[in-house]
Amino acid sequence: MAAAGPSSDMFDEIVMAEERFRGEGYQEGYAEGSQLGAVEGRRYGSLHGAKIGSEIGCYLGFALTWQCLLQKCRDEKNSKKIKALDSLIGMIQKFPYEDPMYDKLQEDLEKIRGKFKQVCKLIQCGEKNITKPKKLSM
């Protein structure tokens, strides 16, 4: 009866080998996939963040330039434009660049884009040769 023990253990090892190797392969694949996924995620996040930062920076440069130009000739017509520019600049300054987990990032970005379009329309009412900066594709 003692001889049956070792042979049944060997038989169990042979039968269970497929299950054991599948489990080991899964663990190795999961660890490698997690590491590669984190690297790819960081790369994608950096690229996407740079695009958003560039877009927001373009809007801010546009708004600050027009704010300076319109400060020289303050009249009732320009006061509405200046007020819209101040609002756009304020929205940009409140944008959470430092918080990657901010849950309303896309919502705030869309509000800034909308305000930028509004400012462009206001400024173009009195100006003939103004071109809007291109929106970056995401």
Image (cartoon, rainbow, N blue to C red):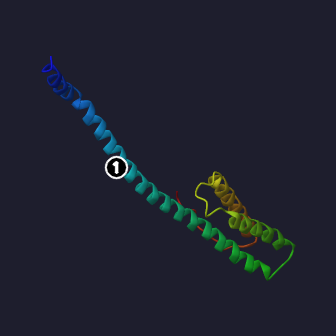
Q: Name the outermost residue toward the left.
A: 3
Tell which of 100 and 54 is nearer to you. 100
The quarter of the picture where residue 6 lies is top left
The residue to which callout 1 is attached is 32
In which quadrant of the rendered image does the N terminus lie?
top left
Q: Residues within 10 Å of mark 1 (few under 14, many from 20)?
A: few
Residue 61 versus residue 1 in the image, above or below: below
The quarter of the picture where residue 112 lies is bottom right
Residue type (three-letter) at the residue carrying disc 1: Glu
* Residue pictured at 41% horizontal, 51% vertical: 37
* Residue pictured at 61% horizontal, 64% vertical: 98
* Residue pictured at 28% horizontal, 40% vertical: 25
Q: Left or right: where does residue 28 sit relative to residue 54?
A: left
Q: Left or right: where does residue 49 sit relative to residue 67?
A: left
Would residue 15 be seen by someone viewing this image from the given angle? yes
Classify mark 1: helix, strand or loop.
Answer: helix
Q: Left or right: where does residue 41 sit relative to residue 27?
A: right
